[in-house]
Image (cartoon, rainbow, N blue to C red):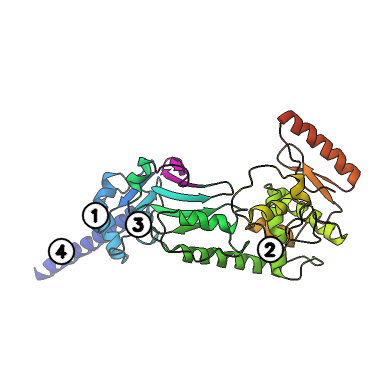
Amino acid sequence: MWRSVASNALTLFIVLLVAAAGLLAWGREQFTGPGPLTQAICFRVERGASLSAVSRALEEQGAVSDARIFRIGAEYSGKADGLKFGSYLVMPGQSMAQVLESVTVGGQSTCGREVNYRISVASAEVVLRELDPETNRYVDVVKFDPAAEAVPAEYLDVAEADDIRWRVTLAEGVTSWQVVDSLRRAEFLTGEIAEVPPEGSLAPDSYEVERGADRAALLGQMAERQAATLAELWAARAEGLPYETPEEALIMASIVEKETGIAEERKRVASVFINRLAQGMRLQTDPTVIYGITKGEGVLGRGLRQSELRRETPYNTYVIDGMPPTPIANPGRLSIEAALNPETTDLLYFVADGSGGHAFARTLAEHNENVARWREIERQQGEDGAGGVQD
């Protein structure tokens, strides 16, 4: 009898073990397998939210199939106490394990709303935008220039929200004065800026910041990034360039930056200026003359006068030999690379071609023909000012 009872108990124990193993395998499959979500959502984890509340909300929004399995998986993986406040993009079919990764170690606010403070050559613009989960693209909600417009109510309504991502973006070709002037008007930043950084020393790029970030520290980050870029590209520079120091290359890069906004042209434009230097010709480029007038403080807003082209200043490359004493803007990586690895050409001139790009020439005769074509385009468009490099 006891032998029978023992045998039955053993059988029951084995059955329970098999059942437990099956249940564990099923739970693991539910946790790591494709999730039930069919359409992307932006899921918000409230500050201080418990794992239980988050798991229930995920189940209610269809992101996980079972809140209990999600909680057990979080406990088992040691991430139960690692919830991060913010908004997270949950894609269709993501497993519970992937969702858990996002809301614990994936970083705050991978979706939701973002304020991007864009500093460009002509103006600075605050852009509040929101991610559309269906398209995974940001959609502008409101934009305004803090120097020229009242702050819209739509911005004020959300600016204090603690799940907003903040970003400052510098366009290529902005001057250091323009950057400082714009940062001083950014109400979401704090701290004083003692002086304008040297021209060319700030990297045009996008910088993620926090509300209340220090302005001077942000400028320091911009300077560090530009210094690292210049050092990297200087080490890989072509041979035979007319620069003795990285700083001279930065001057050339800033001229290239201001002469063309077309990436494919940058190395060719750099070759023109380098060829002119090699032949003892003056650079004769309008952006340097403009910088001598404005000192980088704003936009000239008109064409150059003949008197200004004849006036001798350290930046008037129609009058001085060689390059100006400093950069005339903050060049981006592509322009620095162009200055340090230009195309090999025998080109000496270029002028606008009416399409947004430039027509290049080897001889003055060819160049004059290109200028005549551009003048006709100008006449038809009612504009003036040829730009480019002329004799």
The residue indicated by pointer 3 is 103
Q: Counting residues from the N terminus, which is met first, the one under dot 1 or under dot 3?
A: 1
- Say which of marks 1 and 3 sits in front: 3
Residue 46 placement, left or right of 196: left
Q: Counting residues from the N terminus, which is met first, the one under dot 3 or under dot 2?
A: 3
Whole-percent x, y for residue 138 in the image = 46, 44
Q: What residue type is labelled 2?
A: Thr
Q: Which amino acid does label 4 sit on?
A: Asn
Q: What residue type is labelled 3?
A: Val
Give residue 8's mark: 4
- Say which of marks 4 and 2 sits in front: 2
Magenta span includes 246: no
- Secondary structure under the numbered disc 2 in the rendered image: loop
- Residue 206 appears in the picture as rendered: no
Q: At x 38% / y 54%, what residue is drawn? A: 109
Whole-percent x, y for residue 229 in the image = 62, 65
Whole-percent x, y for residue 164 in the image = 37, 52
Residue 284 placement, left or right of 176: right
The residue indicated by pointer 1 is 68
The answer to whether the residues at label 3 and label 4 have Cβ atoms under 8 Å apart is: no
- The picture quadrant where one finds residue 322 is bottom right
Whole-percent x, y for residue 236 in the image = 71, 67
Asked if residue 352 is positioned above or below residue 215 in the image, the reply reads above
Look at the image and give the residue range highlighted in magenta: 125-151
In this view, the residue in front, 280 or 267, is 280
